[in-house]
Image: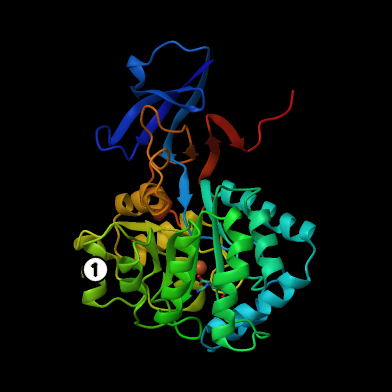
Amino acid sequence: MSTLVTGIGHLATQDDELGELTNAALVIEGGCIGWIGAAIDAPDCDEQVHLGSRAVIPGFVDSHAHLVFAGDRTAEFAARMSGQAYAAGGIRTTVAATRAASTDSLRANVRRLSQELLRAGVTTFECKSGYGLDVATEQRSLQIAEEFTDETTFLGAHVIPADASDPAAYVELVCGDMLTACAPHARWIDVFCDRGAFDAEQARTIIAAGQGAGLTPRLHANQLEPGPGIQLAVEMGAASADHCTHLSPADIDALANSNTVATLLPLAEFSTRAIYPDARRLLDAGVRVALATDCNPGSAYSTSMPLAIAIAVRDMRMTPAEALFAATVGGANALQRDDIGRLAVGRRADFTVLNAPSYVHLAYRPGVPLIEHVWRNGEQVWPAPAED
Ligand code: NIG
Ligand code: FE
């Protein structure tokens, strides 16, 4: 069974060889791209879909999201907009609500947010634990997350919970019983290495334990203040250093000389009214950059990759092409995946149809719902096709 998708006005493949095509078409076979090129050269297929000159981009890869939680933090957000600063301690409010929530209600919340992500054009997302902070709730969080994605991350080291006897005992718990219960349900380990959370020594201990259990690290680093997180991420061979809001020249050098991706999360700076990371300096230094949502109830309660792109272009001086690349290939790099992020023969047929003539409109028309259809594994998944 083959499907020809034609009438593509503008196709951003993100592939080195093909780049951007106009009047393009692609063929889907077995969930992957079987052929891609000029519409006029397209082969015959079993069925055909005509897109009426709309633009097509690869599905977004959201490499940083915290979706397993209960409750919200409306009051904290309102207080912040009246001048209060964001602090890591707010996480404990969500921990209390998450521990008290039923598994069904936590699952329903992840389902709701994963649908929101899909409607925003996201075809692959990462999902962290980190609002349980006890063995049972962290494990339960990851068991729910793995129902929705393969990219699950153990974040038992989000903050030290209110009921911990002392920080050292909590670090021991995270590296011991909690890791044992969580590792079978996670691919990644993350630590929030920042003011009010974990210091470099604690983070190093936790990451090493995670690596010992077969998990690959990714780190929350340098969100709230300058610090050791980014260089620690590089030193430990992390797949990505996330936030990178506060960057020193040594941080940029370390990233530029590594395979660690700098994952920028502008929706967090937007919703905490913080400065944006210096994406320009990172890109000019040759650092590999990803853009992700950071969707969570505290610092960034948004699933909108298009809004993240618009901010990256407007306020972080990324070009529209750089922002699209970071939201697709960048996310795939941050998740160490090469089957997604680009549209090329043999890659997964994960793509988004925009009600626009090109991807530039994602930034040019901020806040406008341009995502018309989303395809994953060669099937249209949003809007869900009507049942026969
Ligand atoms: O990435 N910084 C740490 N974790 C989240 C925020 C969590 C929260 O405030 O609930 C973040 O911004
Ligand atoms: Fe985060």
Instruction: Please tell me whether residue 274 is drawn above or below residue 344 in the rendered image.
Output: below
Instruction: Please tell me whether residue 330 is drawn above or below residue 353 in the rendered image.
Output: below
State the image coordinates of residue 18 (x, y, percent, origin top left). 27, 32
* Residue that appears at 66% across and 85% down: 162
Instruction: Please tell me whether residue 4 is drawn above or below residue 68 in the rendered image.
Output: above
10 Å neighbourhood of mark 1: few (<14), some, or many (≥20)? some
Relative side of 195 to 313, left or right: right
The colour scheme of the drawn protein is rainbow
Looking at the image, can residue 343 be seen? yes
The front one of 346 and 294 is 346
The quarter of the rendered structure image containing the C terminus is top right
The front one of 205 and 16 is 205
State the image coordinates of residue 345 (x, y, percent, origin top left). 37, 27
Residue 291 sits in which quadrant? bottom left
Instruction: Please tell me whether residue 306 is drawn above or below residue 84 in the rendered image.
Output: above
Looking at the image, can residue 67 be seen? no
Count of numbered labels shown in the rendering: 1
* Residue that appears at 67% across and 73% down: 134
The front one of 146 and 201 is 201
State the image coordinates of residue 304 (x, y, percent, origin top left). 52, 57
Disc 1 C-beta below 8 A from ligand 1? no
State the image coordinates of residue 59 (x, y, percent, origin top left). 47, 42
The quarter of the rendered structure image containing the N terminus is top right
Relative side of 106 to 172, left or right: right
Residue type marked 1: Ala
Relative side of 273 to 149, left or right: left
Label 1 sits on residue: 254
Element assignment for label 1: helix
The front one of 50 and 158 is 158
